[in-house]
Image (cartoon, rainbow, N blue to C red):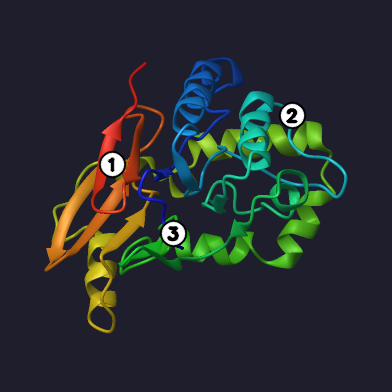
Amino acid sequence: MKQNSSKKIYFASDQHFGAPTPELSFPREQKFVRWLDKIKQDAEAIFLLGDLFDFWFEYKTVVPKGFVRVLGKLAEIRDSGIPIYFFVGNHDLWMADYFEKELNIPTVRDKKEFTFGNKTFLIGHGDGKGPGDKGYKRMKKVFTAPFSKWLYRWVHPDIGMKLAQYLSVKNKLISGDEDVTFLGEEREWLVLYAKRKLETKHYNYFIFGHRHLPMQIELGPDSEYINLGDWIGYFTYGVFDGKKFELKEFKD
């Protein structure tokens, strides 16, 4: 992607809208919409790195209730011509084609390489990567199986959505709440994953979410690992101006 020198590329992850309840989530949704309103002025592209929703499931003709302001703002920005990329996270892994059909936003299901100017990026949500996250890796195989989705689709939404939302908040394996403390550079499994990738190819930036902790760690000559934090307690985001990458906190 050729980047306009006056434009910037923005990154955000792990909003978990809908948690712990729609009422408590609503102020965070409003804040995120204000952030989108601000960055659309100079955005070359916007990357959302997963877990935008605390739970998401698409029936053939129905999607979850709520999130109208967020979805409307994303549609407005996309209609203005600004590219938006959505990476599926572990909480919205049942995302199908709603974003693509209704919002014209491509849905990316695994890590993906991008080049901006002369800088190479490896971008993804981050779940299931590296030597850790073993419990989630097993769970993901079950949840992404076609039979699991087919079976869940037969549960009435009034029951299925409430059950899924409860499990999404309470189940540590799904929520990853046990992972919100820094493990140290030698034990952070996404840092280890990035270092292993550098053995075969050079990347200037590894951009991930999932860990809920803002991190910017130097991996070697002209290579960094960045975790974007979240929009629950940190309200952090990444911005690349064509020369350098920065982690910032949104304050309004």
Q: Is residue 3 left or right of residue 140?
A: left
Classify residue 79 by image quadrant.
Answer: top right
The quarter of the picture where the C terminus appears is top left
Say if 94 sits above or below 103 in the image.
below
Viewer-proximal residue among 43 and 133: 43
Q: Residue placed at 57% from the left, 45% from the top?
A: 82
Residue on which the image places disc 3: 124
Whether 198 is drawn above or below 63: the answer is below
The residue at 80%/37% (across/down) is: 157
Of residues 139 and 193, the one nearer the viewer is: 193
Of tags 2 and 3, the one toward the viewer is 3
Cα–Cα span, label 2 and label 3 = 27 Å
Label 2 close to label 1 by CB (< 8 Å): no
Q: Residue 70: image x %, image y %?
A: 61, 29
Q: How far across and how far down the image is residue 99, in percent?
A: 69, 48
For numbered disc 2, what is the local secondary structure?
loop
Who comes first in sequence, dot 3 or dot 1? 3
Residue 108 image-quadrant placement: bottom right
Mark 2 vs 1, N-terminal side:
2
Q: Which residue is mark 1?
A: 213
Q: Residues within 10 Å of mark 2 (few under 14, many from 20)?
A: few
State if disc 3 and disc 2 touch (CB < 8 Å): no
Distance from Cα at disc 2 to Cα at disc 1: 29 Å
| Residue type for callout 2 | Lys
Query: Local crowd at mark 3 within 10 Å, few (<14), some, or many (≥20)?
Result: many
Which residue does the numbered mark 2 point to in the structure image?
65
* Image spot of residue 65 (x, y percent): 74, 29
Question: In the figure, is residue 25 to the left or right of 221?
Answer: right
Q: Which amino acid, by three-letter code, is at mark 1?
A: Leu
Nearer the observer, 170 or 209: 209
